[in-house]
Amino acid sequence: MKWHKSRILAVLLVTLMLLAAGCSGCTPDNGQIPDTDGKRQKPPAQSQYALPVEPGEKKVPARLVAATVTRVVDGDTVIVRLQNGKSETVRLIGVNSPESTREVEPYGKEASAYTRSRLDGRRIWLERDVQERDHYGRILAYVWLEPPGGVDPAEDEIRSHMFNTELLLKGYAQVMTVPPNVKYADLFVQLQREAREKKRGLWGLEVKDKEPYYIGNARSKKFHRPDCEYGRQTAPDNRVRFATREKALDAGYEPCNVCKP
């Protein structure tokens, strides 16, 4: 009986020794990746690209937010469904299409129809700037039809893949610069000039009335007719005089919504 107990104790002792030997080669899991030679590697740094969200979709810069357009409000405003299922209204940054909802401005219906034909039901990517929402609670964004290849996309990529620039190039919108969202402001002014010189879209409409000069507000980036109430209220330090409407537009100023120069 004593011999039997001694044998059992010996077996248990050997088992414990084997377990201890096996654990001695283990190291705690600290998130590092073992290399083939047994050394440890640090985890890879976080990439500037987000993982693809659909099978076969290429990786996109992490700053972009994927969404699907569910409704087009007008030329420069859409409603989207985000990946989490939430519905949001998106106002395109840096552009302003003629009104087509509460009131109908010249070329407003055409601009709204064009945006609907290009975006309705389409998957897009949203790029935000400094200010993420306006005072209506809408998301402010640059809308990409295809994600750019890097953090600082080249001009040809912006021209061909960003919908904001497409509206400007085809004359369905004018530049509307609202600081602090000015990442592409200089390029937008250049694209508007190109569209105006080629009389595309709304730039092909005849401007019947002309003024001897126009008053610009350097703070609001709007310009007015000389007799406009809001133009006359412009502080002297912010007042800029433009000889023609074209010069005001070239400088990146937006027509006043009241006097409509």
Image (cartoon, grey):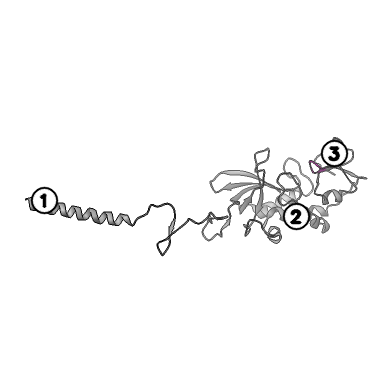
Can you identify the residue that label 1 sits on? 5
Q: Earlier in the sequence, mark 1 or mark 3?
A: 1
For mark 1, does the 10 Å Cα neighbourhood hold few (<14), some (14 to 19), or many (20 or more) residues?
few
- Residue most toward the right? 212
At label 2, the amino acid type is: Leu
Q: In the picture, residue 132 is in which quadrant?
A: top right
Q: Is residue 253 above or below residue 200?
A: above
Tag on residue 237? 3
Q: Which residue, as the protein is rendered here, is positioned at the far left?
A: 1
Q: Quadrant of residue 162?
A: bottom right
| Marking on residue 96 | none
- Identify the residue shown where x is 73% and y is 53%: 167
Q: Which residue is mark 2?
A: 187
Which SS class for mark 2?
Answer: helix
* Whole-percent x, y for residue 188 in the image: 75, 53
In percent of width and height, residue 65 lies at: 59, 50
* Left or right: where 217 falls relative to 67: right
Q: Which residues are magenta?
A: 218-222
Q: CA distance from mark 2 to mark 1?
A: 89 Å
